[in-house]
Amino acid sequence: MIKASIITIGDELLIGQVIDTNSAWIAQQLNSIGIPVLRRVAVGDTWDEIWTALDEESKKVNVVFITGGLGPTADDITKPLLCKYFDGKMVLNEDALKNVTYLFEHIFKRPITERNIKQAEVPDSCKVIINKRGTASGMQFEKNGTLFFSLPGVPFEMMGMVEEDILPLLVSSFNLPKITHKTLVTYGIGESMLADLLQEFEENLPINIKLAYLPNHGIVRLRLTSTNLESDNIINEQFEILKNVVSEYLVTTEDEGMEQVIGKMLLSRNQTVGTAESCTGGYIAHLISSVPGASAYYEGSMVTYSYAAKEKSLQVKKSTLESQGAVSEDVVIEMANGLLKQLNTTYAIAVSGIMGPSGGMPEKPVGTVWIAVANEKKSIAKKFHFRFNRQKNIQLTAMNALNMLRCFINEQD
């Protein structure tokens, strides 16, 4: 079986200054074509550490991905190291130079410097992978039967090269197994309770089908995976059984986020939504508008953090704010109804809460949140108590708000 390893390079990864999203994304792409990732290794900008990682990983796998360290500055040592590791010498590659020149003349529209030109220098022992999105070329090497791909650490640039050049090459070069995934999304039940609910189902799964639990912000994705070429009918049958077992908590039978589910629901009904946010500061708006085509159903948001903004923009009564406080049932209902009038949408979401770490009171501790959803005929509100840090409290507020809207829309049908 073809297996892969991923080596990410950069001191910034080891100290936590930058989060490594590259290796997770590459692993997903490789898995989709039937290449499992055996290991993911992060190393600093240290010659010996990089060299050792190349030696160790190449002994275990057929394909090694390397990201980072290809920039024009002195701390970017990956290219000269690879030149020595693969017994090459640095040369100016004409195709890479044309690409760099084009980017500076036509895209960046600024003069090209000697440092920029050096980006077109590569080891003569590699096959160049042109970076259409940046100046650092990718490089393909081979040693002792193992393929190596060195790619820039900038995610946008790396992704383009993997999708356009490397994945097609791997598919055409190897006889890869077929991997089938089927995923559904649940909400309102924790991972451990789901495991209890699905114990009998999991025990009776065919040997070539595996069930994975993928929890995140109140959602649990359930993924069935098969590597058997003959098992499409079998995995479909098992997926139907899984749907029935978790039907009470089922959100969607696609591998998609709650914001995508909401978008499809609104589009199919030719309806719209707007958001009135206090404690989430526009995060719900960000989620909804991150879906391509959201302009067809999302009208906009009002982030009203202060009492004055709630009064002026959403017509929340001053008396309500003074008597109930901003984090209250009456206030979020007035926020939702005020937004309906301002944006003339089918539905409105409104949230107000105390995200922390400060601001809590005995009667309203940190993590207290009120969420309302409304249309012109009805409004409902619900109180939540979250117990996490500020970021996770915001994320959970957003997920619960979207789920409340999902349920509210279904109730209107």
Image: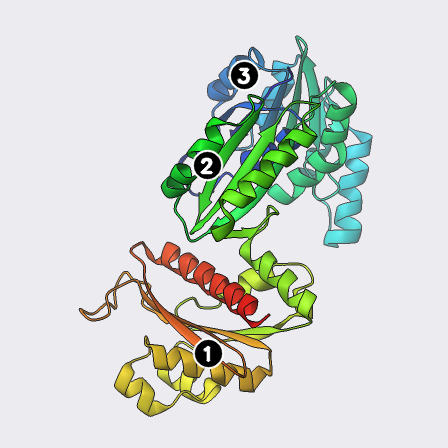
Residue 102 or 314: which is nearer the viewer? 314
Whole-number angstrom distance, CA of label 2 to CA of label 3: 19 Å
Task: Mark yes or no: residue 46 visible.
Answer: yes
**Residue at image coords 56%, 59%:** 259
Instruction: State the image quarter where residue 274 is shown.
Output: bottom right
Task: Mark yes or no: residue 152 visible.
Answer: no
Residue 259 or 139: which is nearer the viewer? 259
Pointer 2 local density, CA inside 10 Å: few below 14, some 14–19, many at least 20: some
Q: Give the answer, above or below, for where 327 lies relative to 157.
A: below
Residue 170 or 14: which is nearer the viewer? 170
Disc number placed over residue 242 in the picture, else none: none
Q: Amino acid at mark 1?
A: Ser
Q: Amino acid at mark 2?
A: Leu
Helix, strand or loop status at disc 2: helix
Tell me the residue that label 3 is attached to.
57
> Could you say where residue 33 lies in the image, as x and y percent from the top left?
68, 29
Foreground label between 1 and 3: 1
**Residue at image coords 42%, 66%:** 280
Q: Amino acid at mark 3?
A: Glu
Helix, strand or loop status at disc 3: helix
Tell me the residue that label 1 is attached to.
379
Q: Give the answer, above or below, for where 97 lies relative to 314.
A: above
Quadrant assignment for the N terminus = top right
Disc number placed over residue 13 in the picture, else none: 2
Q: Earlier in the sequence, mark 2 or mark 3?
A: 2
> Could you say where residue 342 lies in the image, as x and y percent from the top left?
55, 85
Q: Give the answer, above or below, for where 95 lies relative to 293.
A: above
Colour scheme shown: rainbow
Q: Earlier in the sequence, mark 1 or mark 3?
A: 3
Q: Earlier in the sequence, mark 2 or mark 1?
A: 2
Whole-number angstrom distance, CA of label 1 to CA of label 3: 58 Å
Instruction: State the image quarter where residue 239 is shown.
Output: top right
